[in-house]
Image (tube, rainbow, N blue to C red):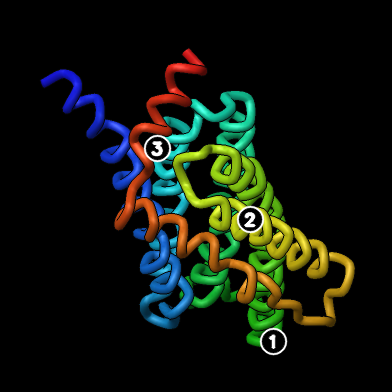
Amino acid sequence: MTTRTAKKSPLLRARVAGVLYLSLLPLSLFGVLSSGPSSRLSIVSALLVQIVNIFVVLALYQLLKPVNKNMAVLMVIFLLLGVPIAMLNELNQFAVLLLSSGADSLRGFTADQLHGLVLFFLHLHDIGISIAGIFWGLWLFPMGYLVFKSGFLPRILGILLMIGCVGYLIQSFAAFLLPNLEVNIALFTFWGEVLFPLWLVIKGVNVEQWEKRARESA
């Protein structure tokens, strides 16, 4: 009975991590597609994404730490650094809402001034996303490395995750260095973040190899 439970444990960890990771996709899409009267829902969705991110990285830490604990810790640190940046960045969206509310406290501003402030805070929000994007990229490298070296997950998934890291970094720094050039390379390098959680949910991990790694790291 104990052996059976132990064998189920890495599969359960893999599937919990995969489900949490996949839940980020609809939350993120909802945040992007919501606008106008639903903009408050968009902000809430963006905040929920970051909360779920915390649980995702903790679940992945439990799954991947037998490979290399230091790299697993680095993965957690990188993602957790991005979470407060992304959450605080939503203050810019709240500022847009307040400026668009027609509150009495805004009567001292002309319509043109209010419009300019709205554009200013929207631009700040875009910059904040690019800053958070650095850490959204960085955490993928140690995670990809751990997957590649694990022996209980396909190496190709690790390679795709590390490619995803490069994509995020190029896109973020391009936004700072080439603000007039729209670079969307992450749209072509994100496949690891889709295929990896799908693999975790559908296939899980090689239990024998995971347990071997766990014994070696104990």
**Image point 51% across, 68% down: which residue?**
98
Per the model, the C-alpha gap separating discs 3 and 2 is 20 Å
In terms of image quadrants, where is residue 133? bottom right
Q: Dot 3: what SS? A: helix
**Mark earlier in primary sequence (3, 1):** 3
Q: Dot 2: what SS? A: helix
Q: What residue type is labelled 2?
A: Ile
Question: Dot 1 surroundings within 10 Å: few (below 14), some, or many (20 or more)?
Answer: few
Q: Which amino acid does label 3 sit on?
A: Ala
Labelled disc at residue 59: 3
Per the model, the C-alpha gap separating discs 3 and 1 is 48 Å
Q: Position of residue 31 (x, y in %)?
A: 44, 70
Labelled disc at residue 87: none
Q: Nearer the viewer, residue 201 or 118?
A: 201
Task: Name the residue at the right extreme.
Answer: 177
Q: Where is residue 25 in the image (x, y as percent from the top left)?
A: 41, 66
Labelled disc at residue 112: 1
Per the model, the C-alpha gap separating discs 2 and 1 is 49 Å
Task: Tell me whether the residue at label 2 lies in contact with that at label 1, contact meaning CB atoms closer than 8 angstroms.
Answer: no
Q: Position of residue 129 (x, y in %)?
A: 64, 62
